[in-house]
Image (cartoon, rainbow, N blue to C red):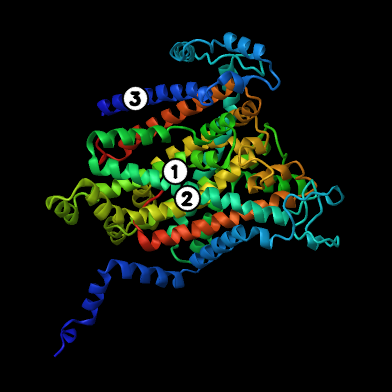
Amino acid sequence: MSHEGLVPAARKQDFEDELPERNRLTALARSLRMQKSAILGLLILLVVTLTALTAPVISPMSPTASSLSRVLKPPMWAGEGHVFILGTDHLGRDLLSRIIYGSQVSLVVGFFSVAFSGAIGLFVGLMAGYFGGKVDYLLMRLVDFVLSFPFILLALSTIAILGPSLELIIVMISLRLWTVYARVVRGAVLSLREKEFVVAAVGIGSSHMRVLFRHILPNVLAPVIIIGSLYLGRMIIIEAGLSFLGLGVPPPTPTWGGLMAQGRSYLYVSWWIVAFPCLAITLTALGANLMGDWLRNVLDPRLRVR
Amino acid sequence: MTGFIFRRLLQSIVLIKFVLVFVFLLLHLTGDPVRVMAPDGATEQDIEQLRHEMGLDKPLLTQYGIFFWGAIKGDFGVSFEHGEPAMKIVIEHLPATVELAFSAFLISVLIGIPLGCLAAFRENTVYDQSMMFGAVLGQAVPDFGMGLMMILVFSVFLGWLPPFGRGDWSNLLMPAVAASLYHTARLARLMRSEMLEVIRQDYITTARSKGVANRSVIFRHALKNASIPIVTVLGIDLALTLGGTVIIETVFAWPGVGRLTVQAIHNRDFPIVQSAVFLMASTFVIINMLVDIIYTYLDPRIKY
């Protein structure tokens, strides 16, 4: 007689739930089928990423080629019989091509700031939560300190003084976000530190490094991934805001915020120059937010990120 | 309790002191502040003269000492652009920013909280789902983009509202709505999830089974408990809105501190930038402190 028969179906299910890896993956796949909004989010992000990667191939024209004979043309469907699908800007440049190229800066800044601040926040959170005491106190006061700054003014003035560049923008945006990771990771580490498997690891004489990276780190990765995806959209919006104020990646590189700033002067005559980049930002941020919500629901429904 | 307030106060003072150091260092980030400030085309002689006039040829610590004593008296130097004390100009622009930020804050509270509650009480209905999708969308729209779109629709196409400037409510409406959008959406989502958690608690079931009227259950039992975590977020939101109206002010030509700062940045008018950053950061610190103190009154379980 096989042992299988002795285990009722329901119990078997319980055991399977304890296999973390497989359970998580299947849960991801299962919930993706159930949540249509998550599919929408992933789809949007996929399309935007592909757009950014293949910009030179798919954009109908050069994003910088200007011509005074075709300035401020409305979108194609206005029926003026030209080939500019979303119209042209004040220098006669094809808006669609500029939006396509603009996705590159948005995505690069979004992904890198999320990853960079994630790395810093993860490190600070691990140190503060694991070592506690003075280390914890000092690091958390540092977090309070950063949080007590009006971020936008800080970023604006620093970028204005040092001069805008892609790297500086990523650093400035990350400067604020790492605190979110740090707080959440610290909280998670504090509770993990008391768990049996960590106490046991310490008990058999594992080094701090081993305990931190082999036992604690894998268990705090889920919230890090969730925060990253929840804030990706926000970071893209902040980058657009900086560009809008003229403190983003400098021209001629097209950025969505920069396009809107230029279009602002022509708002009364050419609504499309502002509207389409705005739509691009909104859709991308929406995609990121939907994906973030879904990841949170699946990986850690109790996690609160503010 | 008094001990906590005292400690929190002390902490805030230390923070403001750090803010001051940062504001001082801001100019020295490039290594040579004079070259940042000097107008394009200034000769070496002009630069040296400016350096001497501003006291920037003294040792760094001496400079900081002078700056610090000035700052304590509210003296951040004279604006290059306006020729008046910088802090005075910033303070003159403060009411406009406060007006905008408070209006935006009020809108987000008055709309976000009821909508979030309604969504929670009608969980998984079409209303709930469309509300929450609206909220996710609201968090995805850049506020300045929303502002420009509103100008396009309500000023350019319909001609209902003035596109910029400060005056009566018609000037305030669009910038306030645009600035509140993100916070409204976030508050609605947060309120919904807090409410959902609370209405599943045993004491709500008890209240209901005692025959307490639905209205009373919602207002006296559920809302009161769900609002505790909301209050912290509200405080942070208020502080964030105050510091975050920069772009909206620029879009609507709203004469507040944010727009002033952006203009000062473009004009390299650093006394203004320093005054503005210091004033906004200090306000931020003080609001955060007040929120922490109010929080301990609201939730007696918290011990400091």
Discs 3 and 2 lie in a common subunit: no
Image-based side of A90 in relation to B190, left or right: right
Eye-nearest disc, 3 or 1 = 1
Q: Is mark 3 on a helix, strand or loop?
A: helix
Disc 2 residue type (three-letter)? Tyr
Side (left or right) of B163 relative to B283: right
* Disc 2 element: helix
For disc 3, the marked residue is B9
Q: B183 or A268: which is nearer to us?
A: A268
Asked if one can make out residue A204 in the rendered structure from this viewpoint, the answer is yes
Label 3 marks a residue whose chain is B
Residue drawn at x 73%, y 39% is B162
Tag 3 near tag 2, CB within 8 Å: no
| Whole-percent x, y for residue A54 in the image | 62, 61
Q: Which amino acid does label 3 sit on?
A: Leu
Asked if marks 3 and 1 touch (Cβ < 8 Å), the reply is: no
Identify the residue under disc 1.
Answer: A177
Q: Do the residues labelled 2 and 1 touch (CB within 8 Å)?
A: yes
Question: Which residue sits at x=46%, y=53%?
Answer: A230
Closest to the observer: B15 or B226?
A: B15
The numbered disc on residue A231 is 2
Alpha-carbon span between mark 2 and mark 1: 8 Å
Q: Which sits earlier in the primary sequence, circle 2 or circle 1?
A: 1
Callout 1: 10 Å neighbours few (<14), some, many (20+)?
many
Q: Where is residue B202 in the image (x, y as percent from the top left)?
A: 27, 58
Question: Crowding at label 2, few (<14), some or many (≥20) Cα neighbours within 10 Å?
Answer: many
- Mark 3 vs mark 2, foreground winner is 2
- Above or below: residue A135 compared with residue B39: below
Q: Mark 2 lies on which chain?
A: A
